[in-house]
Image: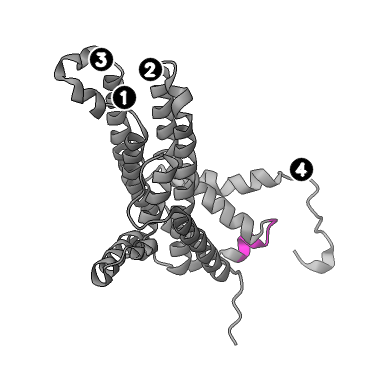
Amino acid sequence: MAVYKRGYQRYQGPVTGHAMRLLAMPRYAWERLMQQRLMIVMLALSCIWPLLCAVFIYISNHTELWSGLGGGVSKMLEINGQFFLIFMNTQATFSVMLAAMAGPGLIAPDLANNALPLYFSRPLTRFDYVLARLTTLVGMLSLVTWVPGLALFFMQVGMAQSGWFGKNWDLGLGILAGFLMWILIVSLVALASSAYVKWKLIAGALILGFFFILAGVAAMINGVFRVDWGSLINPSKAMYSVWCWLMGVETPRGMDVSSCVGVLVGLVFLLGMVLERKLRPVEVIS
């Protein structure tokens, strides 16, 4: 419409709230992800281990099923921090694979098609955009991490003796806090990889390589220099040490919890800097 006709009028209708604007992108992203068969298969596979753990909890709380097998079986079937630590370690692997499948399609297409000006021309800031994309991954990864973890915890609370919750209530908090920290790390790695590489296939490989290659480099440093501090550059190992502290399990040798937390906080800061640098609607090159 030509400007001189003065036929343009500003929109005067109802305006959606800030929360609704943030949830618009995750809602459509979840719908798109659920249309992928491979994503559905991976989600189904990630439910196998929680189901097996649920069966284990059921058996451990029904002594009539194993009372004749000897006294050592009761110790092996005990539900404690070590049990939930094994569960968390297994589900963390599935979360990385899910992030490698879902993460590259969140930011890379917007950068490849120069769509960021369209987003930022609306009442959305860069922080809002990152928060919306982060919410997409947090919601997806929660389905395989703290949601089944707390379900198993409360299943144990309901089936165990009355004094079990009073002695082990901190395990539930450890599951929630430990998984939320892990989801934040994995989601930021996925978003940073998607923002740094515009090709989804390469971005997915970069997400997997970030965790597995760093694990190999850390093991090489420990082997060559005969030290233990090399494991600090492995985010999976550092997070595992924090989980051990949260679940009341002995931490690996040479892994100080405070140092691991410092490394993870520094990693979050660096990933945030990558997103701040890459998510710009206009790039000026001098």
**Which comes before the other along the chain, label 3 or label 4?**
4
Mark 2 touches mark 1? (CB < 8 Å)? yes
Q: CA distance from mark 1 to mark 4?
A: 52 Å
Q: Residues within 10 Å of mark 1 (few under 14, many from 20)?
A: many
Q: Nearer the viewer, residue 133 or 199?
A: 133
Q: Which residue is mark 4?
A: 14
Q: Measured from the top left, where is residue 69 in percent x and y?
A: 15, 19
Observer-nearest residue: 271 or 205?
271
The tag earlier along the polypeptide, 2 or 1, is 1
| Amino acid type indicated by mark 3 | Thr
Tell which circle, 1 or 3, labels the residue nearer the N-terminal end: 1
Q: Which residue in the protein does label 2 denote?
A: 159
Amino acid of disc 2 = Met
In this rendering, position of residue 68 left or right of residue 8:
left
Q: Nearer the viewer, mark 1 or mark 3?
A: 3
Does residue 121 show up magenta in the picture?
yes
Q: Earlier in the sequence, mark 1 or mark 4?
A: 4
Which three-letter amino acid code belongs to the residue tagged 4? Answer: Pro
Query: What whole-number distance in Å separates the C-alpha atoms at marks 2 and 1?
Result: 8 Å
- How many marks overall? 4
Residue 24 position (above or below residue 54) = below
- Secondary structure of residue under mark 3: helix
In this view of the protein, which residue sits in the foreground, 137 or 253?
253
Residue occupying the far bottom of the picture: 286
Which residue lies at the image location 84% right of the left edge and 62% below the top edge?
A: 6
Q: Give the residues in magenta.
A: 117-123
Residue 126 sits inside the magenta stretch = no
Among numbered discs 3 and 2, the one appearing first in the sequence: 3
